[in-house]
Structures are given as C-alpha cells and as structure tokens.
Image: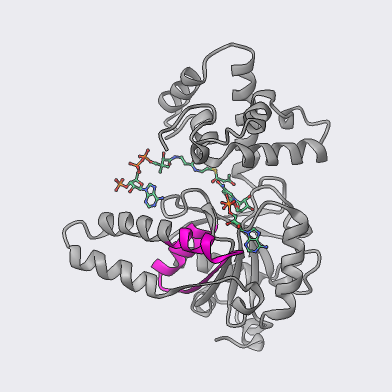
Amino acid sequence: MLSSVAVRNFSNSAVMANAIKNVTVIGSGLMGGGIAQVAAQTGHNVVMVDVDDGVLSKAHERISTSMKRVAKKKFGDSQEEANKFVSDSLSRLTTSTDSTASVKNADLVVEAIVENIDIKQKLFKQLDEAAPEHTIFASNTSSLSIQKIAQNAKRKDRFGGLHFFNPVPVMKLLEVIRIPETSQATIDSMLAWGKAMGKVTVQCKDTPGFIVNRLLVPYYGEAYRMYERGDATTRDIDTAMKLGTGYPMGPFELSDYTGLDTNLFVIEGWAKEYPDEPLFKVSESLRKLVSEGKLGVKTGEGFYKYNK
Ligand SMILES: CC(=O)CC(=O)SCCNC(=O)CCNC(=O)[C@H](O)C(C)(C)COP(=O)(O)OP(=O)(O)OC[C@H]1O[C@@H](n2cnc3c(N)ncnc32)[C@H](O)[C@@H]1OP(=O)(O)O
Ligand SMILES: NC(=O)C1=CN([C@@H]2O[C@H](COP(=O)(O)OP(=O)(O)OC[C@H]3O[C@@H](n4cnc5c(N)ncnc54)[C@H](O)[C@@H]3O)[C@@H](O)[C@H]2O)C=CC1
C-alpha cells in the first residue's frame, strides 16, 4: 500500500493507478453492486458494504449473474475461461456490514448509499476517522453537491466525485468531479483508476447533475410535460427518441429503468434549491406514480408494466 508521503509526491497517473488496489464500495444496491463487480473483474481487491447480510447476499447473487453475462461475452467459445474469469473475480470480492472496519486497508472508498445528504455526511465523518491517511474518498451521487457531502471530512484534498452509469458493467462513462480543494494528485489517481476499470472518463466541476444528469433531467421533464399535455403518448415519445436520435431507450423507458423514486428525488431536490428554474419543475405524473408505489422496472410497474 502507498504511504501518505508517496501520495503527496507522485502526480504521475500510471504510478497512482497502481496505488489503487484495494477498493471499498459502501452500498450494495443497483450502483454499488455494479461498481464492486467491475472493480473485482478488473483485478482490484474489493470490500462491498451494506446494512445487513440479507442485502449483501442478494447483491452477491446479482453480481454473480451479471459476471456470467460479461464472461459469456468475453470468452464466448471457452466455458473453462469464462468460469475461471467469474471465480477469480468473485475471489477478490468480500462483503461486510461494518463500514468503518471495511476501510482499514482501502486505497479508495466509493460511496453509493441512499441519496440523502445527512446520511452521506455522517458516513464520511465516520470513515474519515477510520481510514488511512492516503485513502481517497469519492461519492457516486447523482444529484447532490460533492462539496456538501464532504463537509464533515478533513481530507478534502483527497475527496471527489466518481459518477458511474446504470448498468455499470455495460455503460462506458465515468464522470470525475472535483471540488475546489481536490488535489491534482487525487484527480490523476481517479482518472487512472477509471481507465483501469475500463471506463472512459470525463471531468466536470461540482455543479448540479454534473454533465449527463444536468442534460438528462430537463429532458425527462420536457418528455413528462409533453405526455401530460396530451401531445403524444409515452410509447410514441419513446419510439421517436429511439428512432429519431439513436438513443437505446426513450425517456419513459429510461425513467422506469433508473427508478421513478430516484428521478423524483433528484427533481424535487433541485426544484427546492432552484425554485426559479422552470426546467426543474416537478412533474405531476411522476409524483403520482411514485405515491402509488409504481417505481418502474424494480416494482413491476412505472410508466409501463413489466413481468416480474
Ligand atoms: C441516474 C444517474 O445518475 C445516471 C444514469 O445512470 S442515467 C442512465 C444511463 N443508462 C442508460 O442510458 C441506459 C440506456 N440503455 C441501454 O444502454 C441499453 O438499453 C441496455 C444496456 C440497458 C440494455 O441493452 P439491450 O440491448 O436492450 O438489452 P440486452 O440485450 O439485455 O443487453 C445488451 C448487452 O448488454 C449486456 N448487459 C445488459 N445488462 C447487463 C448487466 N446488468 N450486466 C452485464 N451485462 C449486461 C448484455 O449481456 C448484452 O450483451 P451482448 O450485446 O453481448 O448480448
Ligand atoms: N439508480 C441509478 O441509476 C443511479 C444512482 N446513482 C447514485 O448512486 C447512489 C446509490 O443509488 P442506487 O444504487 O440506485 O440505490 P439503491 O437503493 O439500489 O442502493 C443503495 C444501497 O445503500 C444501502 N445503504 C443505505 N444506507 C447505508 C449505509 N449507511 N451504509 C451502508 N449501506 C447503506 C442500502 O441498503 C442499499 O442497498 C445514490 O447516491 C444515487 O443517486 C448514480 C448513478 C445512477
């Protein structure tokens, strides 16, 4: 493991990439599970953390299924190589319900817990006291300010955003976010780690939604309003955006896939913070579906119905 002195002295990306070997992922849901999976597949030692063993074992099952899909694609002809890829990757992945103990050997901590600022701040305060000095902290938040999430941590030079996309094993993009205090060595290290994870990185300042969600959220809003005015059906809007622009999913399919509760939470948060911005106005149809427990693919119904 790299010492804190070494971290300060090295700004070379390749050297720093080697430094990130031990990764702790906190939160094992949709995103944390995917991040832990890809990290294990790319040779990192991974500790995946969640609140109880039941959640962790479900996440482990999902990871194992997804890894088999990845292995099939990678080693189509050779079942033996595919099996070895899965078992080697899984052997690098351990689980824990103790977040502070899980960071003791971490070079990098990626947080992917519930999108709640108070809970994220509290977690990072505890981790800051428990982790080695050189450990880099990152949040995978979709919509919250990294600066606010980092508020209670002392290591602000070793803090940033690492924003992945769903499904993590498939989506190639990783947004790397800096706050004013983030050191260049930390940015270099996060960029190099992104490359080691097989992702293409882009950089952005700590602004609402970073690059992708700043464009995607108003796009969702316009689609919801178009449907609410009765200008077109959800099906036709989705078909239009898929065939007219080459997007793999239309805005309603993608909303259901991401989770309508997640989308509502993001839009409500921004509507509260930026009340004069019409692009962040909360959609009534979205609010209604969420209040009925129709959260998208994960609950079997959202804008569309799904076979569970
Ligand atoms: C909210 C935020 O903060 C940020 C966000 O995440 S925004 C959302 C970003 N995500 C998107 O925009 C997703 C858009 N959708 C897509 O790209 C595609 O529809 C999709 C990849 C999800 C599914 O693709 P598809 O062609 O409809 O389905 P499918 O055939 O099942 O999968 C395509 C390939 O991906 C693989 N795949 C899909 N999901 C997978 C998973 N969870 N694990 C591993 N592999 C997976 C499949 O094995 C398949 O591989 P082959 O091409 O070799 O067959
Ligand atoms: N859903 C999406 O498409 C995307 C979500 N994100 C962001 O990633 C983060 C996680 O989102 P999802 O994976 O969708 O959520 P999720 O609900 O699927 O998973 C969150 C997990 O965190 C666990 N958790 C909550 N508090 C915890 C704590 N204190 N310690 C340990 N584990 C805890 C929960 O038990 C749950 O398993 C959020 O910040 C979200 O904004 C980012 C990109 C895309």
Q: Is residue 308 above or below residue 42?
A: above
In this rendering, would 38 be left or right of 265?
left
Residue 44, above or below 56? below
Q: Residue furthest left?
A: 77
Name the quadrant of the C terminus: top left
In terms of depth relative to the viewer, which is nearer, 227 or 297? 297
How far from the left and from the top, in percent, is residue 236? Answer: 47, 17
| Nearer the observer, 173 or 280 | 280
Q: Is residue 174 visible?
A: no
> In this rendering, is residue 241 above or below 86?
above
Residue 65, percent from left and from top: 35, 56
Left or right for 30, reference 225: left
Location of residue 89 by image quarter: bottom left
Query: What range of the chain is rendered magenta?
Result: 32-60
Q: Nearer the viewer, residue 308 or 82?
A: 308
Q: Residue at x 59, y 70 (%)?
A: 97
Q: Position of residue 20 (x, y in %)?
A: 53, 76
Question: Residue at the location (50% across, 41% down)?
Answer: 298
Q: As drawn, is 180 to the left or to the right of 79?
A: right
